[in-house]
Amino acid sequence: MTKIFPEIKERFGFGCMRLPMKGNEVDYPQFCEMVDAFLAAGFNYFDTAHGYIEGKSETAIRDCLVKRHPRNTFLLVNKLTNDFFNSEDEIRPFFERQLELCGVEYFDFYLMHAQNKQFFEKYKKCKAYETAFKLKEEGKVKHVGLSFHDSWQILDDILTTYPQIEIVQIQFNYEDYDSAEIQSRACYEVCLKHNKPVIVMEPVKGGILANLPKKAEKIFDQLKGGSYASYALRFAANFSNVIMILSGMSNIEQMRDNLSFMKDVKPLTKEESDAINKVKKVFDSLETIPCTACKYCVPNCVKNIPIPEILVDLNFQKRYTNVDSSWRYNIHTQNKGKASDCIKCGKCESACPQHLSIREYLNEAQLQFEIKKN
């Protein structure tokens, strides 16, 4: 598949939504080390968006990648995000600002971000796809694609409406493969139908598939193979139409582990595939909240509630029933909104790629961490 885009050296990409942090700032020395290691290993694909890390991802890429390495040694992906335009006239100025923040003159790939039924109607109305195709004609974008979070029927509609789309980014991992909500398998098959190569996001499901329940850990430990994350990434690599697999690496140790098996990625053995199916059954029995901590919900919350952190606290309580997670909740909500501050507006749920019932979970958190303690 890489022959379609010969500029892509390997099928492994650096997702820059979860970078190494020091407090609220990107850890530049560690990010520079990760960038250098990534390029030295022969990989060259970097993915960002304007809203990542409250706008700090783009500038970190500028300072740690663009200023330190020749432009022809890396590929840079950016996105047109729903929150940052409301009319056709606002798209180009926003795009030019993205170029400026990243310190580049063009993007190798430009994606219509987080497409779903609601967003797609807005993008059509604002002629966002048409604008992106013009930017490609002008050489400011090399390839136009989309990232997607909805049902396979909506994806089919988008690709039918805009056959010029060159590539599709979908959430794809072994836990979501047969999920009725995420529909990884069905969306992948739509891409096959339209002959569109696939970029995989969330192959480790926001770290969930790297931090397994004890019962699931024992299943993989019996294989005496690689890390838990390696099985998730290699699952995605098993599919021939997958041209790129993104990983949001937040420290150098994660990067070194990923590089160790993604440089010469090996197909899953039958024993490994069987183990993955067993791990899926463990997850199915847990009933934990499948939040990936993408934080798309956060900018939409008028009460500044740290929603992903609260959902993590609930999951921690579900997994470790003998542990009191109240202290975690109190830390996460210090100087921020609490679950009880939710006004039930639903904006968080509209932005959630996982289609989570966030308001219900906040009710649960209020009961678990506030009411029970009073």
Image: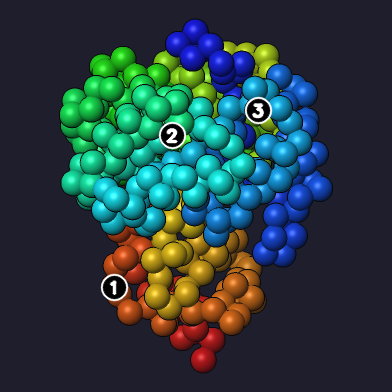
Please indicate whether residue 178 sits to the left or right of residue 30 in the image.
left
| Residue where numbered disc 2 is placed | 110
Q: Nearer the viewer, residue 315 or 102?
A: 102
| Upstream in sequence: badge 1 or badge 2 | 2
The disc labelled 2 sits on which kind of residue? Tyr
The disc labelled 1 sits on which kind of residue? Cys
- Is 100 situated above or below 199? below
For the point 49% across and 79% down, the residue is 337
Q: Are marks 1 and 2 in contact (CB under 8 Å)?
A: no
| Residue where numbered disc 1 is placed | 345
- Mark 1, residues whose alpha carbon is within 10 Å: few (<14), some, or many (≥20)? few
Q: CA distance from mark 1 to mark 2?
A: 31 Å
Residue 154 in the image, given as x and y percentages of width and height: 21, 36
Residue 121 in the image, given as x and y percentages of width and height: 19, 46
Instruction: Give the mark toward the camera: 1 or 2.
Output: 2
For the point 42% across and 82% down, the residue is 340
- Mark 3, residues whose alpha carbon is within 10 Å: few (<14), some, or many (≥20)? some
Residue 125 in the image, given as x and y percentages of width and height: 18, 46
Q: Nearer the viewer, residue 298 or 320?
A: 298
Numbered disc 2: secondary structure: strand
Numbered disc 3: secondary structure: helix
| Upstream in sequence: badge 3 or badge 2 | 3
Res. 223 image quadrant: top right
Instruction: Give the mark toward the camera: 3 or 2.
Output: 3
Res. 301 image quadrant: bottom left
Q: CA distance from mark 3 to mark 2?
A: 16 Å
